[in-house]
Amino acid sequence: MAAFLRRAMWFGLLVTALAIGLHALLMHGLRSRTTDVFGVWNDVVDGRAGADVLFTGSSRSLVHFDAAAIGARTGLRTYNIGMDGTQLDLQLGRLRTYLAHHSAPRLVVQEVDIISLEPDSGLYFAQQYAPYLGEPAVYEAVRRIAPDHWKDRWLPLYPFMRHGPGLTGLAVKGLLGLEDTLYDPVHLGFELRDWAWEGSFDNFLKEHPDGVRYPESPHAEATLRELIRTARAAGSLVALCYTPELVENQRITLNRASIMGTFARVAREEGVPFWDLSTAPVCNDRGFFYNSQHLNARGVARLTPMVADSVMVLLERAAQSPSALP
């Protein structure tokens, strides 16, 4: 019996060691990726996303702020760390992680939108966080929303079992250098979505004939303030930016004045500018959008000079008279 127990113990230790080694190898594969979502994460944690102007926010940051085009127009280094399907807690975690690995940018442009004041309700594309849970700010934000994600950090191979074979495939391709770098949809953190109008908004209108009211969470407002203060404490200027939104959605949002008023009040009280671009002419034309909240390629082409010129004006004002800013 004693010999059997010894053999079982050694077998268990061997299996555990193999699991730990394979886990580390697969995580290395994900950390080696240079494209798409993991490519941006790796730029952030490996210090390759240095920028004079940093864009951050939700999917509307991801698909609206063309970092390369804005950089070409301004002559500044730019990067976009906007994240699909996120609210402010995760955005704050990513900004803190960026600042832990980079010098502070001259300017942080924080995108806000009609659902920014909603509380976090879950993790979108949850597997993206697995290789970065060793980053304190990422782990804190993820655990607040999904407490059981400690398992992804501490249990060998658990993320690959939990999130399915797709994550393992991405890791193996990263290890072998088999990424499709020629057709990477993301460049400097920006994803161009040259999509036609997809039509779901018409169903949304039918489902909400009397309009819609979006949540306004005090926690989200506090997190927005913390994000502003975090960037400013690092030495960055900050601007809040509400990018174009289809006017039809604006009209059916019953508490839009309250939400926009919160953004304006937070900006005023925190001493930062608020760029409300939701009155731009593109907002009146579905041809510039693929849904009510997101611009297509034509819309982004119209937005880019507006954002680039706003950036330049703000930085010039700061250089000439810092005390004149909010």
Image: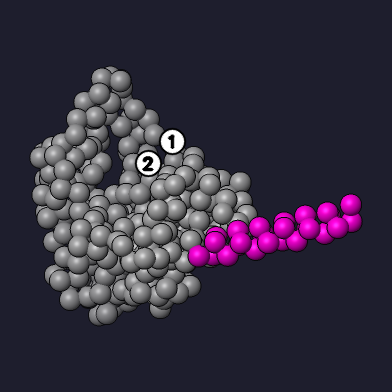
Rendered residue at 34%/27% (across/down): 212
Helix, strand, or loop for circle 2?
A: loop
Q: Dot 2 surroundings within 10 Å: few (below 14), some, or many (20 or more)?
A: some
Q: Is residue 128 left or right of residue 318?
A: right
Q: For the magenta stretch, what is the residue range?
A: 1-25
Helix, strand, or loop for circle 1?
A: loop
In 3D space, how far apart are the residues under numbered discs 2 and 1 (Cα atoms)? Answer: 7 Å
Q: Which mark is residue 115?
A: 2
Rendered residue at 60%/58% (across/down): 19
Q: Is residue 228 visible?
A: no
Q: Dot 1 surroundings within 10 Å: few (below 14), some, or many (20 or more)?
A: some
Q: Is residue 19 magenta?
A: yes
Residue 300, horizontal then vertical, whole percent = 16, 53
Amino acid tagged 2:
Ile
Amino acid tagged 1:
Pro
Q: Nearer the viewer, residue 247 or 15?
A: 15
Residue 128, horizontal then vertical, whole percent = 44, 54
Q: Is residue 146 visible?
A: yes
**Main SS class of the magenta portion in the image:** helix
Q: Write down the residue under mark 1.
A: 215
Circles 2 and 1: CB atoms closer than 8 Å: yes
